[in-house]
Amino acid sequence: MKIHSETNGKLGNIPSLIENKGYKIAIAFTLIFVSSLLIGYYFVSTLPPEGYSTIYLLDYQHKKAIDYPELLVVNENSTFNVWVVVENKIGATQSCEVLQKVIGDMIPSFPVDTDVESSYAQTIENGESWETLATVTINEPGSYSVIFELWIYNETGALDFSYNYCVLNVEVEE
């Protein structure tokens, strides 16, 4: 016991935390801090997600996102159809355009810098989707990428690339 009293005396009469019950204040402060963090996280995580738009492809039967053509034969089955679907979850009506491009090289970056084969434009209400049947014809042998890029009209009426795209890789043989 005497050793403990001597320790307190050496500290310059500063009362210890245990004698002062200061640990209760420290625990209460910690609990309030952690509770504030949890409540803040809850409110941030329950905010509605940011709006988005998306593009995807369905097979020619308009049923699945599989069974895309992979091998074409020149002048025999060198034309195929695929459904292009655009969904608007942006929170407002959106005007957009899908640009269909075909490239025989590696895709260096997006948007692809090549001629547009076809384009499809539509205004889509919030929460709605738009579907269009795209026809692709390739009559030269080789490996190709068929690209569908989603472009959005901004407030000034200019097209902005949305960085949403789909790519179909096809092989064309003679």
Image (cartoon, grey):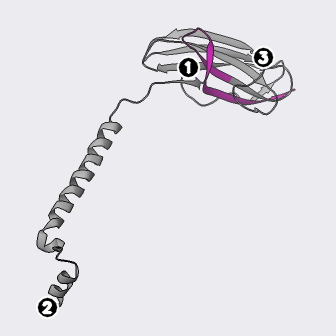
Q: Position of residue 30 (x, y in %)?
A: 24, 57
Residue assigned mark 2: 2
Quadrant (top left, top right, bottom left, bottom right) of the N terminus? bottom left
Residue assigned mark 1: 85
Q: Secondary structure at mark 2?
A: helix
User: Mark 1 and 2 residues: CB-CB less than 8 Å, in contact?
Assistant: no
Q: Is residue 48 magenta?
A: no
Task: Please tell me how many numbered marks the rendered image carries.
Answer: 3
Q: Residue at x 52, y 9 (%)?
A: 123
Amino acid at the residue labelled 3: Asp
User: Mark 3 and 1 residues: CB-CB less than 8 Å, in contact?
Assistant: no
Q: Residue at x 18, y 66 (%)?
A: 23
Residue situated furthest bottom in the rendering:
2
How far apart are labels 3 and 1 at the CA level?
Answer: 22 Å
Q: Secondary structure at mark 1?
A: strand
Residue assigned mark 3: 115
How far apart are labels 1 and 2 at the CA level?
Answer: 83 Å
Category of crowding for the residue at label 3, using alpha-carbon neighbours closer than 10 angstroms: few (below 14), some (14–19), many (at least 20): few
Q: Main secondary structure of the magenta part?
A: strand
What segment carries the magenta color?
148-174
How far apart are labels 2 and 3 at the CA level?
Answer: 92 Å
